[in-house]
Amino acid sequence: MQTAPCSMRLQVNGLSYAAQRWVNVSEEQGKNEFAHSKSVRKVLCLHGWLDNSESFARLAPLLKGCDVVAIDMAGHGKTSHRAAHASYDIYDDLEDIGDIADALDWDQFTLLGHSRGAGVAFLYASVMPERVKSLVLLDGIVPPPWLNKNVVEQLRAYLLDRQRLRAKTSRPYATLDEAIERRLLSTKLAVDEGRAMIERDLIKTDNGFVWSHDNRLHGNSAVRFSAAELDVFLSSLTLPTLLLAALDGHLKEYALPKDLTKNACIELYWLPGKHHFHMEGAQVSGVAQKINHWWASAPTVEAQLLS
């Protein structure tokens, strides 16, 4: 079983994507033979907001029989920032997913997403089901709907944020530990659980340590889907989908979509842990076990189409 990942670079749509790859093989199998086997499950991992590919470093080696590629999504970690005119609305990531898979020479693949990455994975699988074999979502599913702003207020907030964040520079932290401590407050992870992921999002400068992620990620979206529109996505999803929710996570706090249970393709399980339960030392093995068991027992897309 491969515990240390291979670092990768993928050139996609003018961006240089950083990625980490785990090819999980048994001792009896050679990597070359395994990598070209039709039995290997190709898994593309999409992380949460302000996280990066390192968030999957504990989970990925436990996913049996898989070729796992976890990317730093646009503007995160070691991946390029989008162009000055571009934005970071959740649907801006959708085009890149298919192109990343093409760069990997993957016709079909499984999507595994956490939090914001789960929302991206859910939208992509809903609209491009021919590319996705199955969907695994970790403490996230639909992106947040309209809340307190109407369409005019939302667009205004987006434009004002664009103006504000263009001129903003990251405040340097005097030490690496100070930056890590600050970020740990929002993740609720222990130091040994979150340190590597947070370090991947930091750059050392003459003045201290600054975040490498794009400040525009903190801005409002230009448009959000309504609850009714998200229900259309939910009802349109036709792929085998495993949704793992953390008992002390975001889905528990913000509630699940009310129409979730109407889609028989989605299987929901609650597991112990917080929002980053796939990084928690006490919980990651349970998350991996549930995913491996579901992949072994869940119906294939072909079987569902024939039923």
Image (cartoon, rainbow, N blue to C red):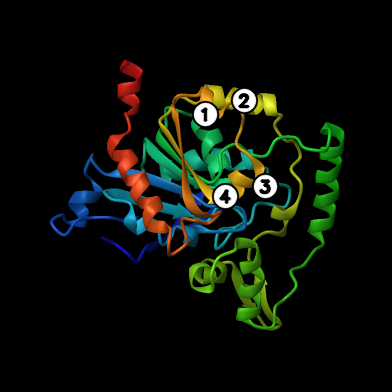
Name the residue located 49 percent from the left edge and 68 percent from the top edge: 193
Of helix, strand and loop, which one carries label 4?
A: loop
x then y, percent, for residue 271: 46, 48
Q: Nearer the viewer, mark 3 or mark 1?
A: 1
Give the residue type that dot 3 points to.
Tyr
**Neighbours of disc 4 within 10 Å: few (<14), some (14-19), many (20+):** few
Which residue does the numbered mark 2 point to in the structure image? 231
Q: What label sits on residue 14 in the rendered view?
A: 4
CA gap between label 1 and label 4 equals 25 Å
Residue 13 in sight: no
Q: CB of mark 2 within 8 Å of CB of mark 4?
A: no
CA gap between label 2 and label 3 equals 23 Å
Give the residue type that dot 4 points to.
Gly
CA gap between label 2 and label 4 equals 33 Å
Which quadrant of the figure has residue 142?
Answer: top right
Residue 121 in sight: yes
Q: Earlier in the sequence, mark 1 or mark 2?
A: 1
